[in-house]
Image (cartoon, rainbow, N blue to C red):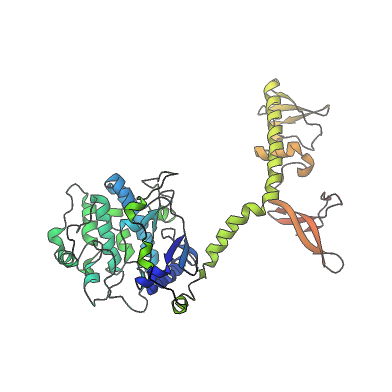
Amino acid sequence: MKCLDKKRIKLKSGESMALNERAILSRVSSGDASPFIVCMTYAFQTPEKLCFILDLMNGGDLNYHLSQRGTFNEEDVKFYVAEIILGLQHMHERNIVYRDLKPANILLDECGHVRISDLGLACDVSESWPTAAVGTQGYMAPEVLQKGVPYAFSADWYSLGCTVYKLLVGSSPFRQHTSKRRYCEALIGRQKVLQIPESFEDSTKAFLIGLLQTNIEVRLGCQGQGSEELMTHSFLSNMDWEMAKRQRLQPPLIPPQGEVNAADAFEIGAFDEEDTQGIRLTEEDQQVYKEFDVVIADRWQHEMTTTIFDAVNEDFNQMESKRRAKLQQRLNQLTHTLTSQPEGEITSVVSAAPSASPPLSRSTSATVMVASQQKSLDHEDIPSWPAELLLEWWIDPERYGCGPSDCLVESELLRLGGPFLHTWQKKHVRLFPNRLEIYVKNQHGIPLKGAEVSV
């Protein structure tokens, strides 16, 4: 959960930014949400806080892991670049410019996959392009720093170039320029200050140079094809994009489980409540957030079904546990029987004779002794049943008749019955691939043989 303090927002005059983040998160999280963006399930507020319920990312950010490792090699960076591109592609297709791409905003999930986070500076460019100098120094494109110059997706591709450079080298390409003026001057004369290690592959050098072009017209990703220009670049020529989209590629780094993969709170900087002691929230301030609350329906439904699944299935799970325990006990008995009898002859320990004998031996013929009755079967007559269904049949042959059932689901059902269809009646339901069977139960709750309804 991400919480924003309303007093601190008022102090910084950040109301529009907070509402913008909520709006952008709603857009990228609705419908076909991207697995490469930290999405929102719902947002709510208290008298003093704005709260976002977001995807849990406990793998830390790339800036933290960079501080632990020093640098990433070129192959590792290709993995991160691919997933970042897919996340940016999702935003750009929805006319959203991110504007704050940097290693600190690239989070990892518990498996090591990328999620782009912190969409507070993102903006909608469907109606007009922004001109404000927004972003993090060291990652902003030249056009972003030039006052009054409109820009769009080009800014994100330049920031990606700065991010790739830092992951490979360990520092920003323009880290030595501390003032905004010096930084802007460095960008204009980029070719003079950008130093790419000679040890890098030619494709890596070309990728960096293409992204860090001052001239938008020749910058990679800005020549009419967008993300496709990056995806087809020689730097990523061996990337399996279908596997990448499905998160099937092996991440180069698996975050340690049970550890805090983040910098210490004292390094980050604690929130100083003294800054907001003189701030008072008025009714007018609260009115600004009157439409802040939102629920992303499909994500909320998924969360609810996941949360209540165990509770809904508690009774069934208990019955299933007992059934499996009985099955395991019977398996142990059969295993003991099979290992103690001479090869080719097996004495069954069940007390009831099933209507067909299961395969208990791989020999050409098997002699099965059931309730003092002997029957010989040829190998070709023995059905090939899955082991678990076979054991279920061996325990309860009447349930499956002559063999294991193709029943998919078996459970209880409440349905309206009686002369006027106003009485709730408990039925026993069995769902098969080609039909649904509903059984009446007797006074003891045992399903009667013969389906009442078969659809």
Give whichever of 263, 430 is nearer the camera.
263
Q: Position of residue 34 (x, y in %)?
A: 44, 61
Give whichever of 446, 175 is nearer the camera.
175
Give whichever of 414, 289 is nearer the camera.
289
Q: Residue at x 72, y 39 (%)?
A: 392
Q: Residue at x 44, y 58 (%)?
A: 35
Q: Position of residue 104 (x, y in %)?
A: 33, 56
| Quadrant assignment for the C terminus | bottom right
User: From what the image shows, is residue 22 above or below residue 317?
Assistant: below
Q: Is residue 140 left or right of residue 27?
A: left
Q: Residue at x 71, y 41 (%)?
A: 323
Give whichever of 357, 195 is nearer the camera.
195
Residue 261 visible from this viewpoint: yes
Q: Position of residue 375 (x, y in %)?
A: 79, 29
Q: Position of residue 159 (x, y in %)?
A: 27, 62
> How many numbered discs sit on the rendered protein?
0
Q: Residue at x 57, y 63 (%)?
A: 301
Q: Is residue 61 left or right of residue 218?
A: right
Q: Is residue 424 left or right of residue 74?
A: right
Q: Quadrant of residue 324?
A: top right
Residue 239 visible from this viewpoint: no
User: From what the image shows, is residue 390 above or below residue 300?
Assistant: above
